[in-house]
């Protein structure tokens, strides 16, 4: 399985992994500036998102991403993961710590987190609307639930477009199980920045705040203005945050 991807720049490798309500287009504001800052930047669509087809059999996102790195000849990369992409980043860093040089988690999910009743209820409401064929209502629910007050109409429309694409691709393919191999977060060795949003759903704030107690090299930063998608809500601020964190840990290529 080959994931659809873009790449730009030269230097230490950075891999951008998208949220589950988006695809690789969510990184439009970041990927060129990061390449210009002296990094080799890759962004990809996970299975069933953007231009990558939905899976036709059991699969694992982490294995897919490592296979992409292998295909590109990249031994180690810094992972920057948002939400669903953050959950995948944690799995890669735990199962293959030798492949990860640094880790930035933006409102990340985690397999070790037990979802709250409120988060489960939100998922059930979305599923009911999708099963009823009311994609417009499902999209409105997702946009209202996940985008913070800093997300303007342009951001909201971009998320609607990406989420609709995911619905269409995944509904056409049907349900396929994702394999969930066991792993321990304590195996992660990469320096880690866990970012949360003050306007995000509480589950994701708790995940980020709890990671420093589980990972020796982790620190937590809460952005009081942010919702669930800070890289889209205040893109320039997040680009600056990323370049500052990575610049302290990876030497970018000299321009």
Image (cartoon, rainbow, N blue to C red):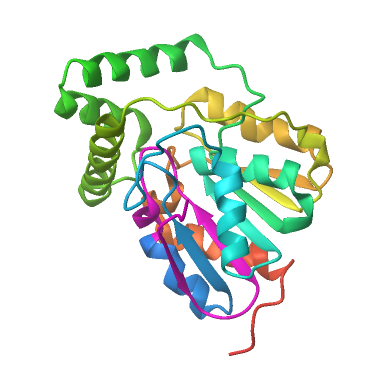
- Decide: is 43 above or below 33: above
Locate residue 171, reporting x and y percent.
Answer: 26, 30
The single residue placed furthest to the front in the displayed view is 57
Locate residue 142, reporting x and y percent.
Answer: 30, 30
Locate residue 81, reporting x and y percent.
Answer: 55, 48
- Decide: is 128 above or below 163: above
Indicate whether residue 5 is drawn in magenta. yes
Indicate whether residue 66 is drawn in magenta. no
The single residue placed furthest to the bottom in the displayed view is 255
Locate residue 28, reporting x and y percent.
Answer: 36, 62
Q: Which residues are magenta?
A: 1-27
Write the residue at 36% across / 38% down: 21
Q: Quadrant of residue 101?
A: bottom right
Write the residue at 52% across / 36% down: 59
Write the residue at 21% across / 46% down: 157
Q: Is residue 181 left or right of residue 236?
A: right
Q: Is residue 28 left or right of residue 162?
A: right
Q: Quadrant of residue 27?
A: bottom left
- Decide: is 114 above or below 94: above
Write the residue at 34% across / 28% down: 145
């Amino acid at each position: 399985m080959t994931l659809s991807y873009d790449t730009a720049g030269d230097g230490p490798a950075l891999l951008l992994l998208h949220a589950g309500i988006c695809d690789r287009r969510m990184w439009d504001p970041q990927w060129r500036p990061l390449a210009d800052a002296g990094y080799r930047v890759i962004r990809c669509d996970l299975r069933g998102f953007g231009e990558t087809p939905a899976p036709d059999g059991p699969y694992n996102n982490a294995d897919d991403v490592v296979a992409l790195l292998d295909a590109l000849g990249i031994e180690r990369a810094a992972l920057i993961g948002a939400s669903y992409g953050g959950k995948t980043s944690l799995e890669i860093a735990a199962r293959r710590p030798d492949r990860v040089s640094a880790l930035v988690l933006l409102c990340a999910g985690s397999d070790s987190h037990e979802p709250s009743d409120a988060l489960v209820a939100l998922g059930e409401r979305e599923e009911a609307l999708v099963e009823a064929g009311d994609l417009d209502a499902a999209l409105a629910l997702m946009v209202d639930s996940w985008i913070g007050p800093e997300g303007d109409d342009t951001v909201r429309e971009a998320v609607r477009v990406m989420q609709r694409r995911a619905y269409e691709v995944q509904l056409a393919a049907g349900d396929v199980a994702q394999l969930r191999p066991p792993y321990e977060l304590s195996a992660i060795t990469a320096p880690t920045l866990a970012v949360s949003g003050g306007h995000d759903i509480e589950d994701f704030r708790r995940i980020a705040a709890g990671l420093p107690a589980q990972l020796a090299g982790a620190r937590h930063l809460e952005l009081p203005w942010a919702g669930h998608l800070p890289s889209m809500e205040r893109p320039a601020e997040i680009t600056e945050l990323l370049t500052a964190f990575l610049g302290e840990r990876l030497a970018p290529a000299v321009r």
